[in-house]
């Protein structure tokens, strides 16, 4: 059981790091902050990806482009 949970956690961590690496290229942040978020996500997994989405990712806009989605 524990092996399955660990495998799931490492799979989610790999997917989270890949998401942050691909998505962070489009942010206007400094390179140090970009590397910091990649390392944070590598250490904390999906929790770090969640913090990246809250703190660093550009907001998603509606189809009309008038207001961000909340």
Image (tube, rainbow, N blue to C red):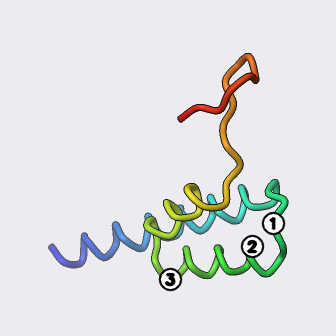
User: Relative to 37, does residue 46 appear above or below in the rendering?
Assistant: above
Circles 1 and 2, Cβ within 8 Å, touching? The answer is yes
Answer with the quarter of the image where residue 46 lies: bottom left
- Of badges 3 and 2, the one in the foreground is 2
What residue is shown at x 84% (from left), y 73% (from top)?
Answer: 30
Q: Where is residue 47 in the image (x, y as percent from the top left)?
A: 43, 67
Decide which of tag 3 and tag 2 comes sooner along the chain: 2
Decide which of tag 1 and tag 2 comes sooner along the chain: 1
Q: Position of residue 20 (x, y in %)?
A: 65, 63
Label 3 – label 2 distance at C-alpha:
15 Å
Relative horizontal placement of residue 7, taking residue 68 as reference (left or right): left
Label 1 – label 2 distance at C-alpha:
7 Å
Question: How many neighbours does mark 3 have within 10 angstroms: few (below 14), some (14-19), or many (20 or more)?
Answer: few
Residue to which mark 2 is pinned: 34
Circles 3 and 2, Cβ within 8 Å, touching? The answer is no
Of residues 16 and 66, the one nearer the viewer is 66
What residue is shown at x 68% (from left), y 27% (from top)?
Answer: 67
Q: How many marks are shown on the rendered structure?
A: 3
Residue to which mark 1 is pinned: 29
Answer with the quarter of the image where residue 68 lies: top right
């Amino acid at each position: 059981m524990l092996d399955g949970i660990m495998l799931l956690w490492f799979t989610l961590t790999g997917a989270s790091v890949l998401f942050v690496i691909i998505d962070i290229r489009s942010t206007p942040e400094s390179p140090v902050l970009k590397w910091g978020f990649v390392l944070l996500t590598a250490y904390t997994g999906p929790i770090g990806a969640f913090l990246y989405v809250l703190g660093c990712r550009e907001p998603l806009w509606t189809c009309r482009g008038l207001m961000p989605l909340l």
